[in-house]
Image (cartoon, rainbow, N blue to C red):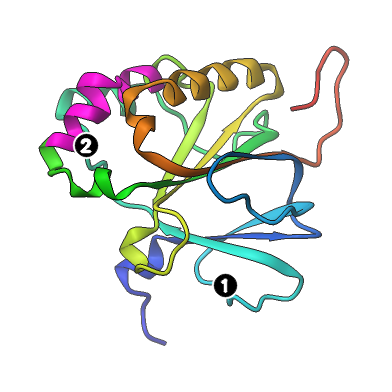
């Protein structure tokens, strides 16, 4: 058997359908064209055919290096963040984003200035670690036919839902978001048994 290529090993597929590991609590179109509504989402490490049984849509992205992060920021992120799959993290969100042509016309250093010097994207994110775990997926690396540029997957405990909303609000009011021309906000919950005093996502 041939070993998977590096890009294949980093590929993730997000399948929207009527059944899956994550129940869709709500879908919200923030800007641009809305996505078809689905009842559930499945996250698969690897490729899934577009014609997967019961699928209403499929989004794909690959993990990559942190492209706008400096060494001190990388060290701070690694020191605070925790991985996905924590038992208490029964809430999740998938945020697909597409940026406009003006963003991609900027040079790497110009995008860095908007990303951090102006918008404080990394500094904002650090405030919500380790409560909110995330994994960023790049879509443009897969070709021009992908409907989004980035897919960010978040996981967090129900008690951190308000903090997650604050995180998104801070990012969406930053100068960087002036370059976003399509964004959806998909909130999800895994199957869980509420304990006394707990609340859903």
Whether residue 115 appears in magenta in the rendering, the answer is yes
Percent x, y for residue 147? 47, 60
Taking depth in this image into account, of 2 and 43 the one nearest to the observer is 43
Percent x, y for residue 173? 43, 20
- Secondary structure category for the residue under label 1: loop
> Dominant secondary structure of the magenta stretch?
helix
**Is residue 42 shown left or right of residue 192?**
left
Report crowding for label 2: few under 14, some 14 to 19, many 20 or more residues within 10 A (C-alpha): some
Q: Which residues are magenta?
A: 110-125
Taking depth in this image into account, of 34 and 23 the one nearest to the observer is 34
- Please name the residue that numbered disc 1 is placed on: 48
- Please name the residue that numbered disc 2 is placed on: 68
Percent x, y for residue 180? 40, 39
Q: CA distance from mark 1 to mark 2?
A: 30 Å
Report crowding for label 1: few under 14, some 14 to 19, many 20 or more residues within 10 A (C-alpha): some
Can you tell which quarter of the image residue 201 is in?
top right
As drawn, the residue found furthest toward the bottom would be 1
Q: Using the rendered image of the protein, determine whether residue 191 is visible from the camera's viewpoint.
A: yes
Q: Using the rendered image of the protein, determine whether residue 74 is visible from the camera's viewpoint.
A: no
Q: Residue at x 38, y 18 (%)?
A: 124
Marked residue nearer the N-terminal end (1 or 2): 1
Whether residue 42 appears in magenta in the rendering, the answer is no
Task: Relative to 94, say whether 11 is above or below.
Answer: below
């Amino acid at each position: 058997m041939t070993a998977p290529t590096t890009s294949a090993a980093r590929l993730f597929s997000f399948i929207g359908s009527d059944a899956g590991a994550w129940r869709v609590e709500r879908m919200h179109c923030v800007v641009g064209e809305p996505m078809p509504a689905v009842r559930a989402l499945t996250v698969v490490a690897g490729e899934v055919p577009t014609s997967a049984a019961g699928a209403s849509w499929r989004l794909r992205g690959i993990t990559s290096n942190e492209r706008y992060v400096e060494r001190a920021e990388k060290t701070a992120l690694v020191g605070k963040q925790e991985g996905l799959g924590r038992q208490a993290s029964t809430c999740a969100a998938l945020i697909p984003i597409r940026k406009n042509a003006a963003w991609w016309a900027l040079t790497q250093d110009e995008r860095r200035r908007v990303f951090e010097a102006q918008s404080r994207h990394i500094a904002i994110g650090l405030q919500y670690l380790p409560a909110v775990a995330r994994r960023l997926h790049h879509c443009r690396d897969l070709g021009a036919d992908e409907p989004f540029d980035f897919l960010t997957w978040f996981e967090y405990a129900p008690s951190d839902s308000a903090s997650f909303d604050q995180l998104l609000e801070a990012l969406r009011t930053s100068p960087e978001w002036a370059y976003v021309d399509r964004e959806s906000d998909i909130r999800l919950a895994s199957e869980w048994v509420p304990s006394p005093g707990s609340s859903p996502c």
